[in-house]
Amino acid sequence: MLKILVIGGGGREHALCWALRSSPQVEKVYCAPGNAGIAEIARQLEIKPTDTKKLIEFARHEAIDLTVVGPEDPIVGGVVDTFRREKLRVFGPTAAAAQLEGSKAFAKSFMRRHNIPTAPFAVFDNAEEATRFCRESEGPLVVKADGLAAGKGVIVCETPAEAEAAVQHIMVERAFGAVGEKIVIERRLAGQELSVMAFADGRHVALMLPARDYKRALDGDRGANTGGMGAYAPAIRLDDPLLEEIERGIIQKTIDGMAEDGIPYSGVLYAGLMMTESGPKVLEFNCRFGDPETQVVLPLLKTDLVDVIGAALAGKLDMEPLEWRDEVCACVILTSKGYPGKYETGAPISGTLKTESDGLLRFHAGTSAGTGGVITAGGRVLGICSRSSTHEGAIASAYAGVERVQFKGAQFRTDIGLRPAEVHRMRRAPAERRGRF
């Protein structure tokens, strides 16, 4: 029987703990640092995700059989490298491979070099040059801080003036700190967004169910970018020819390119895609399970997650076909008042908070145990998830679950999945828009 350590404390990690704890091969799950919901199914540890020394000490002392890394910060910081050097079994990419997420400039240059479809772009480390570029550009732009910014370092701009303001915000005002010393400016793509995650073993890939994630804070995809306000899966069927195109032309091509560059990639690769008129294009790469996508994908996975991770670590993903439930899973995220800006915490949470109850799954993110019960402790607080045989049923049930939870200032989008994503193979557009690119 296995003892497993999960690093992280959000909704993604709650879903991971839940899926791993469901395996008949697992004796005990630990989570560092966890949250109030994770404490129900795993032992919480007072260890920060970036405190690699203490994580190593715990893994050795408790004879942990497998460590699964959730958040991006420890991955980009090299926690996987350190565990491997200490001969401890760990699932996730190395720091070198995680540059695909840790540096947007690295990722864009990689995609250009390996002919992986993405938006035209330019990289700047000088605010004046970046501002001049925006002023001389035509059409909508996207301005991105180069480094990690908790999902908030991307500013979507309608006009050159908005792009100039974004450059000022990131590079001059240092809204995201040092990660904005370098920026990427790219053409804004139009189309339907799609999230595709895949397990990777350095050579082979195994695609997970594609999901639709809702990044913007407000209904109708308005407001600031967040870490995710909800999701559903599958967004397209696994037998759709479009998914084969994504696997062959983006996911497998990325793994092959990393191997060719001498940076083998093992772990989970997340591709945020835009389905444009000229085909699927990469908006971003993440080097770990996405959140909230994990909260809707893992509940549909029939194959034992422990077996999948074992196959990835052994380089045998081609020998472990994934099986999925013939259902739809939807998730609505409840957030604290003010999120994704400055938000309030410490509000008592009432209602049904148990992980599994009433046919729903409740994955805690920003929660902790207070003196009188569970309280809010972060921007994203809870993910209310539901599985159903129909898309409409999953959405309706998730929103019914939202009504059973209350805390002061609770916010959520009311349009998650109300218009099912209809992603089709797009016709090839003969020409791109005019502009500086």
Image: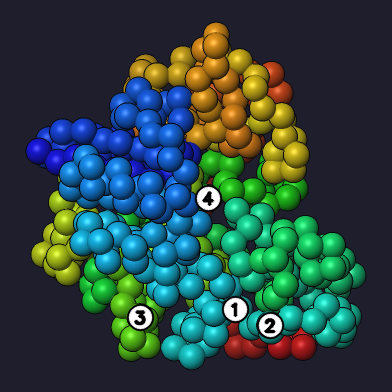
Q: Would you say the residues marked 2 and 4 are in contact, meaning their CB atoms lie under 8 Å apart?
A: no
* Residue 295 position within the rendered picture, expressed as x and y whole percent measured from the top left: 41, 41
Under mark 2, the amino acid is Val
* 10 Å crowding of disc 1: few (<14), some (14-19), many (20+): many
Q: CA distance from mark 4 to mark 1?
A: 23 Å
Q: Which of the two discs, 3 and 2, sits closer to the camera?
A: 3
Q: CA distance from mark 4 to mark 3?
A: 29 Å
Q: Would you say the residues marked 1 and 2 are in contact, meaning their CB atoms lie under 8 Å apart?
A: yes
Residue at image coords 71%, 23%: 409
- At mark 4, the secondary structure is strand
Which residue occupies the foreground of this view, 112 or 82? 82
Q: Would you say the residues marked 4 and 1 are in contact, meaning their CB atoms lie under 8 Å apart?
A: no
* 10 Å crowding of disc 2: few (<14), some (14-19), many (20+): some
* 10 Å crowding of disc 4: few (<14), some (14-19), many (20+): many
Q: Which residue bears the numbered disc 3?
A: 263
Q: Which residue bears the numbered disc 4?
A: 213
Q: Which residue bears the numbered disc 2?
A: 123
Residue at image coords 21%, 61%: 87
Q: Would you say the residues marked 4 and 3 are in contact, meaning their CB atoms lie under 8 Å apart?
A: no
For residue 407, say whether it is visible: yes
Under mark 1, the amino acid is Ala
* 10 Å crowding of disc 3: few (<14), some (14-19), many (20+): some
Q: Which residue bears the numbered disc 1?
A: 105
Return the disc, 2 or 4, that comes first in the chain's sequence. 2
- Residue 355 in which image quadrant: top left
Which residue occupies the foreground of this view, 333 or 123? 123
